[in-house]
Amino acid sequence: MIPYIACVLLFLIGLFVVISKRNLIKIVIGFSLIEYAVNLFFALVGFKRGALAPIITTPEQVRMGVARNFVDPVPQALVLTAIVIGLSTTALMLSLALRLYEKYKTFDISEIRRLKG
Amino acid sequence: MEGRILPLFVAAPLAGAFLVPLLSKLWSRFSDIIANITTALLLGISIYSWLILNAGGMPLHYWVGGWRIIGIAMWFDALTALIIFIINTVAFCVTIYSIRYLDRYTSGRWKFFTLLLLLIAGLNGLAISGDLFNMFVFIEISSIASYALVAFGTEEEEVEAAFKYMVLGEVGGAILLFGIALIYARASTLNLAHLSQVLAGMGRTPFYWFVIGTLLIGFAIKMGMEPFHAWLADAHFSAPAPISAMLSGVFIKVTGVYAMCRLMFNVFGVSRAETPAFFNLLIAFGAVSMVLGGLLAYTQTDYKRLLAYSSISQIGYILVALGIGNFWGIAGALFHILAHALGKGTLFLASGAVERQTGTRNLEELKGLEGSMPATTWSHTLAAFSMAGIPPFAGFFSKLFIIIGAITAKMYWLAFLAALFSAVTLGYLTKVVNLAFFARKDEPRTGAKEAPALMVLATMLLVVLALLTGLGFKGVLGNLVGPAAKVLLNGLEYARLVLGG
């Protein structure tokens, strides 16, 4: 149970950083925290204590019922995809932050308000 | 029925997005040509698949790699047909329009078309996907492309809007992924059809409602519903006009409303009779969006910002109609998605033409464009009529269906509110028409030339479609919208069709 609570805590810390910090880079870091929290949660979903790695090399293993004692491999594959998506969003977000710095000469979001909202 | 054509909806725009940067090195016009061929092809195969669907009467399916429910499923039923048709019609007009619109940017023509094709690939993929995680991936593909496209002009305001939009949108995406992880934790399957059977066996536990709530927050951010509307106004305001048309006309509806409907109705099996709480929630948030969006639109002086707030208001209409939950309500919501895509698409394209020709979007500076830009003026005026619900345009019938739905469900105050805000829509759109396009005789006029022919053509194509949809509303309701509404109303019938077929 503790790892799940830690995930939720990490998520909330990330959300707090995104909402409360004024520095663009810190907002990106907060977003990364949220993303890690969700990925960690997803990976935990497939975890089974004391189970084997999900690798089958011979047909005998299937017959012996080894498959019942495997860690679920699907969440790991999904998390890998989510990490790749997260990489591209973080890269785009950082490049937008750099462009903003070039235009406004500041990383402070409270000074970047040309838009009325 | 096996639909071998389905992967093309994703493969064609992805191939286009790959070829555009490659071939545009040889000749920069290749990017226009490839993008237009791709969207024309997509429109062609949408109509072709719809014809097969209507002829066979059975939904099309495709199992990627033949792995059936443990692999990736693609699924094309009446609801998908409607959404695919909307995406590709607007995309087709937008790519034609972009050819000349992009002249105002000094460089990066190929970047624009690559990103636009990726956006289309994501939306099409989301519409045909029958797999939960794939839906998330396609939502992210189209979202990332849209963030970059909002920042396309790389001026201060555009980058600022893109950054704010991106932070909010990605938090929404993370919440969606969290919801998906929760579902997987309990159901251990990702195929939507299989998932709906597993969830049906679990009953309406607190966990069920927690997952619905988590997913709803994610989708609410993507669709720009109140109170998450802040990104929408800035992003629509700052994006290039064809992208505003794509975002407002298609993106918020497909990644927000369509994905939500597919999951809630077909997977979670909500229905007005069994889970009224969900529908009342939709009505509550929808009504707030409708009222606030409409009132905020009234106070705007910037052309595109006004249209953006109007989009929030129209999303409110769609949610309210879904919340009514009977056949007319849901058919009205789907009809409104179609009518709004065509109408608002025209309005944003017209606003782009005005900005390109006059150099401003401030309604207080624009005057009497009717003499100099007649085609844009009339496209805009007719589309405004459609949005405001004046017969015989598409927007009239969608609002009529919503009001019929509200009355048959005995929600008279909702029918009244919908009719009232139809008048508000007419009010703020008339304000644009009066201020920008028609001037009194003694007032000075803004000097400008008509927009290039291709831009006018694309704008007029959309408004003519809005008119035709309205004139042929019986056919559209019977063949396109009605069956799509039945897919949602029949809820768990979806699983039986997928797994049986």
Image (spheres, coloured by chain):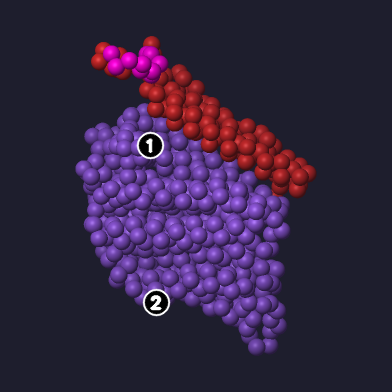
Tell me where residue B281 appears, x and y as whole percent: 38, 49
Residue at image mark 1: B211
Depth order, front residue of B44/B305: B44
Q: Which residue lies furthest to the bottom in this view?
A: B441
- The vertical placement of A65 against B386, above or below, is above
Helix, strand or loop at label 2? It is loop
Q: Quadrant of residue B33?
A: bottom right
In the rendered image, the vertical position of residue B34 relative to residue B171, given as above or below = below
Residue A16 in percent (x, y) is at: 58, 33
Q: How crowded is mark 2: few (under 14 residues within 10 Å), some or many (20 or more)?
A: some
Q: For the residue marked with disc 2, what is the amino acid?
A: Pro
Residue found 58% across the figure and 70% down from its top: B455
> B377 or B207: which is nearer to us?
B377
> Majority secondary structure of the magenta segment?
loop
Pointer 1 chain: B
Provide the residue designation for mark 2: B391
The tag earlier along the polypeptide, 2 or 1, is: 1
Is B375 placed left or right of A100 in the picture? left
Choose between B25 and B83: the one closer to the eye.
B25
Which residue is at a point 56% across and 73% down the rendered structure image?
A: B456
- The chain letter corresponding to red is A
Report x, y in % for residue B101: 62, 64
- As drawn, the residue found furthest toward the front would be B26
Image height check: is B297 above or below B442? Answer: above
Q: Which amino acid does label 1 sit on?
A: Val
